[in-house]
Image: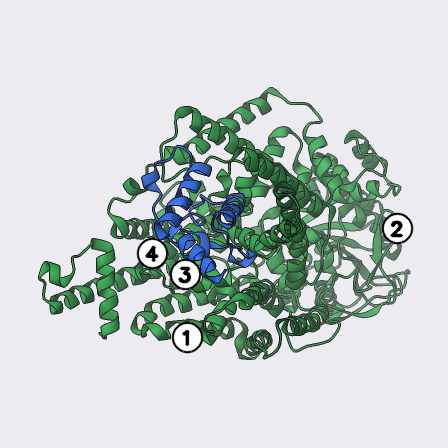
Amino acid sequence: MTKDTLGTVKEFILAEFLPGEDPNALTSSTPLITGGILDSIATLKLVGFLEETFRIQLEPHEVDADNLDTLAAIERLVARKGRAT
Amino acid sequence: MNTQTSQQGTALIASDTAVSTPSEAGIPRQWLGMFAEVHQARRALVLAVQLGLLALIVRQFRIESTAFLQVCLLAFGGALLQEAIPRPHRLSFFALLSLASIALVFGLRQGALIVASGLALIGICHLPAAFRVRVLVLALAAGVLAALRLDWISGPWSRAVWPILGSMFMFRLIVYMYDLRHETGPKSLARTTSYFFLLPNVCFPMFPVVDYKTFKRTYCDVELDRIQQVGIQWILRGVIQLILYRVVYYYLTMSPADVTNPGDLGRFLVANYLLYLRISGQFHVIVGILRLFGFNLPETHHRYLLASSINDFWRRINIYWKDFMMKLFYYPSFFALRKRRVSERASLVIATLVVFVATWLLHSYQWFWLRGSFPLTWPDALFWGILGLLVVANTLHESSRGRARRLGNRKLTVSEMSGVALRTALTFCFICVLWSLWTAESVSQWFSLWTSAFENGITAQTWHALSVGAAAAGVTAIGASPGARKPQQSRAPGGLMNRTFVTTAAIAALFLVGHPRVYTRLDARLATVMDSLREQKLNRQDAAMLEAGYYENLLSVERFNSQLWELYSKRPAGDANLRDSGGMRQIPTFLVEELIPSLDITFKGVPFQTNSAGMRDDEYTLDKPAGTRRIVVLGPSDAMGTGVLASETFASVLERRLGAHGGYEVLNLSTSNYTPPQHLWLLEHRGFAYSPDAVVLVGHDDDADRASRHLATVMSRSIEVPYQELREFAERAGVTAGMPESEARRRLKPYSDEIVAWTYRRIADLCRERGATPVWVFLPFLVEDRQQVDEALKQHAASAGFMTLDYSGLYRGKDIRSFRVAEYDLHHPNVAGHTLIGERLFRDLSSGVISSRLGLDGRNDSTKGLP
């Protein structure tokens, strides 16, 4: 599950926002929001993707660097929300 | 050293030099502890040197204010001292330092009031009641504070408290409540107190909107050393920006009225935008100081001058504000719309528009707490409206086509780099234009700026200037584009240690460059520039405007001119100008306004009376008593005696001194804001009625500008100009009755010199016709760099036939500030100042040619020893 989540999200981010970039450069700790990869539109696209793919429901206050800044944080968020639902 | 710090030291070594664990390397634990101690001592020493040099630079360049230097010393000392404090108590230590800074700047009483008000607001946030109830109580408390802010009810706060209290709570309370609603972790009084009373806030009414969750999340999240070193870099960067701001403010800014061609327009637009360096500089310094205490906050601005699109600009400038709006408005709006099944694109558009409308309103809300007014202006609405629409358009574009993002610093191709450079240059130009609209007094003034710039078409010289400017912008943009920079890794080969060394060297270099012993050895002109950059003052244009009371009622000064705003913010409550105090009235004649006769009011804290003829003086009969000699004094507010009693003005001092010789009257016809053409009219229609033997006209270095400005005012109000020559000047300048004042001012400005020269000639001619001796006295303002007489002006007065008295050296060797009626008032002398001028005038009038005309031959013996 963990590997799937991380890999799926990574694939989505690479395809959607970083086409042509080296996949190895995107690690589980690469800063996505604070590093400027995810702007507001990209963040909302990612939220839509997470909700649809992992069948979770995010709240506006959860859309921040705490939860979405790295692949690792996203993985934790998905796991937490998955448990909650 | 305790175990904790030892462990931290170990961690620091590990972080910096990748040391193996003890078991791996076989190094005894005590050795490792010793290494850690040495490392920590070295780190503390380097930090002390860096902070010491930064403090010297702050002092050397008089960055911001004296209070800021004190707060810097407190913060820097605290940052060094915290090393000795166990980690769990450091946040409490920071909170205490923050509270101490408030007492340091505001004193115990006012400081206690700020803290008590703040704690009360924080207390409301934590009331044991439902969230909605707490929000309601907070709104009620805000209502009470608003009433106090507007002076509807009186409170014990000084006026200076509001901007600081406002900046601490107006946005942070909103963020705090939002996060409190969703926070699940333990509450901490030290963290909350730190968050609201953030240490350097006491010196900065304009403060970044720090996000509470980020503040909490990033506290000491990596090694303190790393956080601090970035902080040091940002403080240095901020200080450099504040110095650059002075370069722009003192040497590049120009008045809209001075724009006469496209080259001027370009300079005006760029300088106007670059004034923002002050805010970005302050924000860098603020967050830099916070980082010294372990708050690993992100940067507030990211190379905003190099934004390559409107959205990019919005993302780079004032990032904290953007994040605040995203959190409070954008995401909640988007989610709410999505829940109502609104399409994604429509939701994006609406949420973006909500952000910009809210930004517009919240800026006014911010100014309410800072200045007590709630400005909603057209330029403001247009700025945010246009910016909002452009961001929406860009958002739609990016949402459908995506935006190029890169991982790391991949080198761009030449064509990519050229594209970025071109977009960067265009965005910069566009933002300069939009910014000029935002900061314009009115939309009509903004249009007038453009029409006047292109009135005469574009000359070859302008094309040349524009192409040079475009080339410079292109080269800068290319040089600064991401692809042109070396990859991150190669930029910092030695990691933290190297960066620390480079930063320290840069700080030392700035200190040396700013030291008089160094820069005075350079070129003399450069030394003069460096001298000017070492102090905070008004530029010539603002000082002149301030003197004319021009900014009194303009919102723009409160909102965009931080230098003037600071000066104004020092004024006590109720410190209105003479017009607003009921001392002057508008009249539909060439004078435009006049002192109301038989007044008895309080103005600037002192009684202000006028006689039945509207003079700030005793009653005088029109018929001159036999054997009496009369001197009429004409000047603006300083001669009228703003802030001092009528009996304390230099005219009264002169009258008393002359009185010792019997039979002298000095009639003070000086009136606030009057300019040379008004003096002419006043003298002709009222002054000569008193049959003066001498007329003393007070001159200032901005008389020429003020003379043409008055003519512009009169023309714009369609008031008849009673002098043929002045009408001709207006005609030559293309000024017509009813023309917008800003446009008329701009057109008449080139004729300022001729207008004042003619006015002086006319006054002197009339004096001679009436048998009065014309005397022109140059009085310097009460600022160090405005002590020299304008030689051209003096020459005009001399050519016209005035006896000229040049008081350029009046304050030489003295503390000029001690002669001001108030610290914030650069133009009005206090009693000591008036005495100095009056005595000097008496001495000069008692000697030379005029003394015989005034019957004062040989009577200057009593003045020996005077300055």
Mark 1, residues whose alpha carbon is within 10 Å: few (<14), some, or many (≥20)?
Answer: some
Query: Disc 3 is attached to a residue of which chain?
Result: B
Q: Mark 2 to mark 4: distance in Å?
A: 70 Å
Identify the element where label 4 is drawn: helix
Mark 2 and mark 4, same subunit? Answer: yes
Q: If you read the primary sequence from the N terminus, does the residue marked by circle 2 or circle 4 appear first?
A: 4
Residue depth check, mark 1 versus mark 3: number of the one nearer the observer: 3
Residue wearing tag 3: B218
Residue wearing tag 4: B229
Spot the green chain and give its letter: B
Seen in the picture, residue B158 relative to A29 is either above or below; the reply is below
Q: If you read the primary sequence from the N terminus, does the residue marked by circle 1 or circle 3 appear first?
A: 1
Label pair 2/3, CB-CB below 8 angstroms: no
Q: Amino acid at mark 1?
A: Ser
Q: If you read the primary sequence from the N terminus, does the residue marked by circle 4 or circle 3 appear first?
A: 3
Mark 4, residues whose alpha carbon is within 10 Å: few (<14), some, or many (≥20)?
Answer: many
Can you see residue B848?
no
Q: Position of residue B546 (x, y in %)?
A: 67, 53
Q: Which mark is residue B161?
A: none
Query: Disc 1 is attached to a residue of which chain?
Result: B
Please tell me the colour of chain A: blue
